[in-house]
Amino acid sequence: PRGCEVCYSYGVSQEVSFDAELVTQHGLRLVRQFDMTLGGAYTPPLPQFTFYDEGLGASRDAAARLDTLESHVRRFGELDVRKVLQCDVEGAEWEALWACPGAVLDSFDHLVIEFHGLDELASMGFHAALLEKLNVHFVVVHVHVNNHGLDVDADAAAQKFTEVLGTLVPRTLEVSYLSRRLVPDAARVARAAKAFPTPLDYPNVHAPDVMLNVWP
């Protein structure tokens, strides 16, 4: 994320290696970490981390300790600051990103999002609409299937996909986006021909990674 200064990281749990690499390897000066599920059990391990006992939602809900991406960006006065968004919020990403104005999305250089429930038929129309919205502002540059659970059940790989209209759809997919502002030649954006995962990928747990043979 060359040139970025700040990361908004939602759903940190106790796994902050991504956040740490942004600071130690890419020079970000600040990571704002949001998670309302930790109950005081988390202490930021780096001085560049600032933790908030809040989650991400489609609207502000003080009782549930939720606020919107727009509210957070405007609260900290960082609309014009170059930013990264990391988001792993167990399904809340769909409504939260749908509610986010395009001007706020445009203020991020990179999105790294774990999408949940991609195989839910009842939600596919809404999911498609959000993905189309994101495609207006960003291009997909990488995808990866979370292999969580394969370290305890080697047969769980088949459970990572659901067949929908003859296509195997991953239930959960990690997607990396790059702002179209940073793509000077839109004609060079093309469908990927490579197989995923690539040599740059690393499994989420100590088990074989999950092959994507039909996506993106």
Image (cartoon, rainbow, N blue to C red):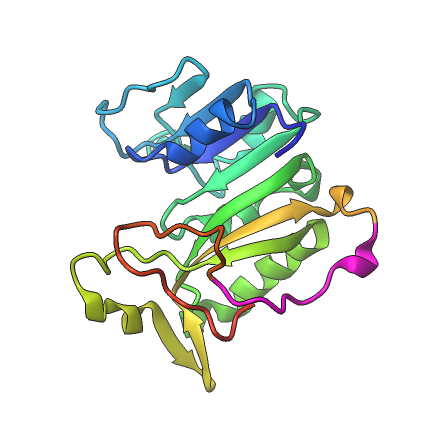
Is 108 placed above or below 72 here? below
Number of numbered discs on residues:
0
**Left or right side of 152 for 183:** right
Q: In front here: 113 or 24?
A: 24
Q: Which residues are magenta?
A: 185-196
The outermost residue toward the top is 47
Is 188 placed above or below 55 here? below
Q: Main secondary structure of the magenta part?
A: loop
**Left or right side of 4 for 69:** left
Q: Quadrant of the N terminus?
A: top right
Residue displayed at 62% across by 55% down: 140
Residue displayed at 46% across by 33% down: 9
Residue displayed at 25% across by 31% down: 38
Q: In front here: 75 or 117?
A: 117
**Left or right side of 188 for 51:** left
The outermost residue toward the left is 152
The outermost residue toward the front is 199
Is residue 91 among the parts visible in the rendering?
Answer: yes
- x and y percent of residue 189 in the render? 74, 59
Is 54 placed above or below 203 here? above
Q: Quadrant of the C terminus?
A: bottom right
- x and y percent of residue 64 in the render? 33, 34
**Left or right side of 187 for 140:** left
- x and y percent of residue 159 in the render? 28, 71
- x and y percent of residue 51 in the render? 38, 21
Q: In front here: 150 or 90?
A: 150
Is residue 98 among the parts visible in the rendering?
Answer: no
Say if the magenta span includes residue 194: yes
Residue displayed at 40% across by 70% down: 120
Say if the magenta span includes residue 144: no
